[in-house]
Structure formats: C-alpha cells, structure tokens
Image (tube, rainbow, N blue to C red):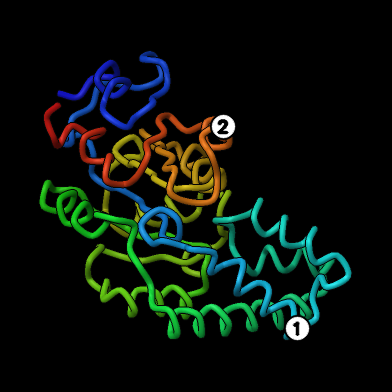
Amino acid sequence: MTTASTLATAPGTEAAPAAALAPRALGDVELIVLDMAGTTVTDDGAVEQAFTLAAERSGIALDDFEGSLQYVRDTMGQSKIEVFRVLADGDEQAAQRANAAFEGAYAEIVERDGATEVEGAADVIRELREAGASVVFTTGFAPTTRDAVLDALGWHGLADLALSPVDAGRGRPFPDLPLTALLRSGATSVSSMVVVGDTSSDVEAGTRAGAGLVVGVLTGAHDRAALEGAGAHAVIESIRDLPALLGLRGE
C-alpha cells in the first residue's frame, strides 16, 4: 500500500501534506489521464513556432505579437481555438482562420522535425496498463494535430483513447476532458482517476473534475510554483516518476 508519507518521500517527488492525500495502491487507480505536449511528448518550442507562423499567415495579434505570445505561453494546455478567440477579441472568423493556420503550421513542424516522447513515456504507459489501469491521452490540440503527433510517434493504440476538446465539449481548465475520459473508460468513480499534466490548466481540469490524485510534471510549460498554485497534489520531475508515486515500484 502506498501511503501519503511514502508519496512525500518518493525519489524525484514533492507531494502535498500527508492529510491531502489518501492512502492508495494501484488497485485503487482505475484511470490515468495523461496530457500530451510537455507531459508525454517533448514540445521543444513547437507550439510557439506554430503560433508564430499562424500569426504571420493569418495576421492575428500582430499588433502586439510579444504580448500575444506570452498569452499563448500562459494558456498552454488550453483549447487552441479558445486561445485564438481571446486573441481575436471575439471575431469568430479571425479565430477560426488563425486556428486553421496553427494546425497547418504544427503539422508542418511535426512532418519536418518529427515528434519525440518525453524520455521513458511509452514504457511508463505500457507499465501502467499492464498493472490494470486504463490510460487516456488528452490535449488542447484539434484532432488533426493530435493525430499527426500520434502518427509521428507510432503511438496509435498505445493508450486506450485520445481526446481533444471537441470530443468532450470544453477544453481545459474545464473538467470536461478528464470527465469524458472517465465516462469513456468505464471507471467507477472520480476518486479512482489520476490526472497528470505539465500546465496549470491541466491541474485545474483535474481538480475541478474531482480526481483522486492530480500530478504536475516539470518537463513542460509551467514550473513547480505554478503547478502547486493551481492545486496539484504532487509534483514530480517527469512521467518516469509516476509509477513510483503510484506504488508500482519499491523504493
């Protein structure tokens, strides 16, 4: 049985105070919801590159490009169309043009440079599924962009399911993605769900969904302070540390 105290001292892990985490073994975990870019897939600035190209091609937010780019950084993990709606000041046609330009640019970058997993991510996902948990990818990308990344990695079938905001209703930080993953996977309770991500939006979506454990990782967009400030129950260096946090590996 993995207790709150062992969570707090697992290698590479800083967890919330013991009272915040109930004792858990992997048998208590039915579903693990994993973000893609920054959590399981290395970003390497691809989102910012794609936004820069989208801005040039669509003309959106060029009056204050640096400010808009900072907004993109701050909202990493959120639905991209929602980000563009804000940058377009509610102009739906402009937002749709910019989003289409972003999707096209990101696909070009993936085709040119390929995609790289966060070290050990695929092995961790296999380990979690072999231990009996369902694994669902979630992302702020549209399905075409999401699938381009999965194609590049050869990851179709690695997880049980991959969800984009359009599949759930609303993107992060709303709880729709993890809750849709819960419903689609057949998990029996929100307390049996673990949500893992690299952004404050990932963390907020998990906490709003009532996940039993919400974990931040430090391989992506936001730092420890941002993840803890958003309500993460635990923050780990990388997804490689997740099995130990869940009690799959002994100390």
Q: Identify residue type, mark 1.
A: Ser
x then y, percent, for residue 198: 47, 47
- Which residue position is annotated with label 2? 225
Left or right of 227 in this view: 95: right
Left or right of 56 in this view: 236: left
* Residue density around tag 2, few if under 14, some if 14–19, many if 20 or more, within 10 Å: few
Which residue is rendered at x = 63% and y = 83% of the image?
100
Number of numbered callouts drawn:
2
Name the image quarter holding the C terminus: top left
Depth check, front residue: 224 or 189: 224
Which residue is rendered at x = 72% and y = 56% of the image?
71
Left or right of 200 in this view: 8: left
Q: Is mark 2 on a helix, strand or loop?
A: helix
Q: Identify residue type, mark 2.
A: Ala
Check the image and report above or below for 20 versus 149.
above
Q: Is mark 1 on a helix, strand or loop?
A: helix
x then y, percent, for residue 120: 24, 54
Task: Name the quadrant containing residue 7.
Answer: top left
x then y, percent, for residue 99: 65, 77
Left or right of 121 in this view: 199: right
- Which residue position is annotated with label 1? 58
Which residue is rendered at x = 39% and y = 78% of the image?
114
Depth check, front residue: 48 or 60: 48
